[in-house]
Amino acid sequence: MYKIAIVGERDSVLGFMALGFSVHEATDAEAAGKAVQALVKSGEYAVIFLTENYAMQLEDELAKYKDLPLPAVVSIPGQGGSTGYGMNNIRSAVERAVGADILFKE
């Protein structure tokens, strides 16, 4: 059975431990990138959540994983709140899959 992981700053990710997520703290984007790379390489994860602030900084590295069937790397708001980056990525992924933007505009 596949697992779910979350990578980000301590205050943003610790609560997910109670939900059974594999929690990986990162103090900076470089550490977050290494954690994501290790999680992908393990082959054990179906979904890896990454806080938006790190996802924005690791955009080029994360592009390598966009076309992989697993894991899905999804950016979520961190401790500073949403920047809209994660929603834009989801919109783009849906558009690639469906061929049109079917999500409602905000």
Image: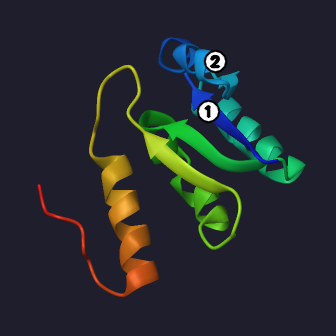
Q: Residue furthest right?
A: 42
Instruction: Confirm or deny contact between disc 2 and disc 1 (CB under 8 A).
Output: no
Whether residue 105 is situated above or below residue 40 in the rendered picture: below
| Left or right: 67 as drawn, with respect to 53 | right
Q: Residue at x 16, y 64 (%)?
A: 104
33 w.r.t. 14: above or below: below
In which quarter of the view is residue 67 placed? bottom right
Residue 72: give x, y in percent of width and height: 61, 57
Outermost residue, left side:
106
Mark 1 surroundings: few (<14), some (14-19) or many (≥20) residues within 10 A: many
- Quadrant where the C terminus is found in the figure: bottom left
Q: Is residue 11 left or right of residue 35?
A: left
Instruction: Find numbered disc 1 in the image and state the secondary structure of the residue it sits on.
Output: strand
Q: Inspect the image, locate mark 1, and give the three-letter code of the amino acid beneath it.
A: Ile
81 vs 97: above or below: above
The image shows residue 15 at horizontal and vertical percentages of 53, 14
Q: How is the image coloured?
A: rainbow
- Residue 18 rendering spot, x and y as whole percentages: 60, 15
Dot 2 corresponds to which residue? 17
Q: Residue at x 32, y 58 (%)?
A: 88
The image position of residue 60, as x and y in percent, is 57, 59
Residue found at x 46% / y 80%:
97
The span from disc 2 to disc 1 (Cα, nearest Å) is 9 Å
Closer mark to the observer between disc 2 and disc 1: 2
Q: Nearer the viewer, residue 30 or 52?
A: 52
- Position of 90 with respect to 42 (left or right) is left
17 versus 91 height, above or below:
above
Of labels 2 and 1, earlier in sequence is 1
- Give the residue type that dot 2 points to: Met
Which residue was labeled with disc 1?
6
